[in-house]
Image (cartoon, helix red, strand yellow):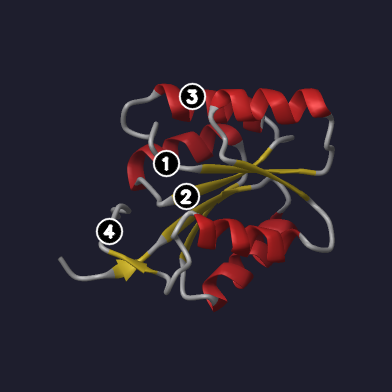
Amino acid sequence: MAATPCTVLIVEDSPIQALALQQTLEQKGLRVLRALDGCTGVAMAERYRPDVVVLDVQMPKMNGLEACRRLKQNPVTQNIPIVMLTAHGEPATLTQGLDLGAVDFIPKDAFSDTVLLETLRQLRVLDDGLRSGNAQG
């Protein structure tokens, strides 16, 4: 099977933050999909089956914790790693997200991009940006 770029689904309600993340990831050779709310993000994950989902905690329609719960309960998406982004690092939120199946929590700050890229390396999504294909679409 031919190697294809790894796909990252960014679920972030701030278009500015989503675009900044998208540009950072695309510069590393990754394919990026974007959703502006949890409902759309869950539907896109089911349809495209990305290699990883980067999920904001606070969003309209469905927050990131509920989206994480739904993704992990669905057999189609349950094995996709989820990285949560948050502007608020309350311990209860962090614990709840990890209990729901998120693999990491990244605070939204000046180091978010660096930490996210390292997390993607640890998940083997960013080795060379190529994988023999989980994503479809």
Q: Residue at 83% x, 37% y: name it.
A: 89
Please name whichever residue, 91 or 74, is drawn nearer the observer in this view of the structure: 91
Quadrant in the picture for the N terminus: bottom left
- Asked whether, in this view, residue 56 is left or right of residue 41, the answer is right
Residue 13 marker: none
Name the residue beneath numbered marker 3.
70
Tell me the SS state at disc 2.
strand
Q: CA distance from mark 4 to mark 2?
A: 12 Å
Vertical position of residue 13 compared to residue 32: above or below: above
Image coordinates for residue 76, horizontal then vertical, percent: 31, 32
Tell me the SS state at disc 1.
loop
Q: CA distance from mark 4 to mark 3?
A: 23 Å
In the rendered image, is residue 23 in sight? Answer: yes
Please name whichever residue, 100 or 14, is drawn nearer the observer in this view of the structure: 100
Q: Residues within 10 Å of mark 2 (few under 14, many from 20)?
A: many
4 or 3: tag closer to the N-terminus: 3
Q: Amino acid at mark 3?
A: Arg
Name the residue beneath numbered marker 1.
80
Residue 52 marker: 2
4 or 2: tag closer to the N-terminus: 2
Image quadrant where residue 98 sits: top right
